[in-house]
Amino acid sequence: MKEYVLKKNDFLVSQTDAKGIILFANDDFCNVAGYTLEELVGKPHNIVRHPDMPKAAFKNLWETIKSDKVWNGYVKNRTKDGGFYWVYATVYPMYDETRKEKTYLSCRRKPSEQEIQEAIELYKTLR
């Protein structure tokens, strides 16, 4: 599997509804993940979930944001072509005035090599 290493200035943004369906994705997210905007919108965000990620990490994410708290963590995602990339993600619960519903905004940046290694070690202990 080929790793895509984010550039220093890459800043991936997406918005989902309360069920995790993608409503918006910025150009950086599309470019890194290898999808067009049209391929992402309307799909579950787990379209980029990498099988190496422990279910416990996403359980914690959803419990946190459904409690109206901000979640931060490291995520290994899968690209359309089967590769992968690591991000440091911050997920914000918010009320979308236009849609009149709760949505989630995820902002992701490049993690350091040390942060990735620490996440890999932590995730080995989770299921």
Image (cartoon, helix red, strand yellow):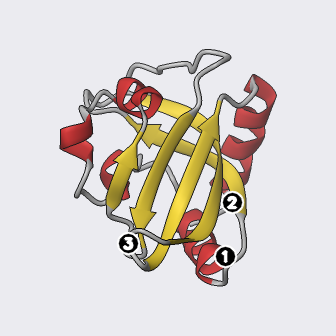
Q: Is residue 54 visible?
A: no
Judged by depth in the image, the label closer to the viewer, 3 or 2, is 3
Reply above or below: 74 against 44.
Answer: above
- The residue identified by callout 2 is 125
- Sequence order check, earlier mark of 1 and 3: 1
* Mark 2 secondary-structure assignment: loop
Q: Residue furthest top?
A: 7
- The residue identified by callout 3 is 99
Amino acid tagged 1: Thr
Residue visible at 78% across and 41% down in the picture? 118
Pinpoint residue 109: horizontal percent, then vertical percent.
65, 33
Quadrant location, the N terminus: top left
- The residue identified by callout 1 is 64
* Residue 83 in the figure: left or right of residue 15: left
Residue visible at 25% across and 27% down in the picture? 81
* Residue at mark 3 to residue at mark 2: CA–CA distance: 39 Å
Amino acid tagged 3: Arg
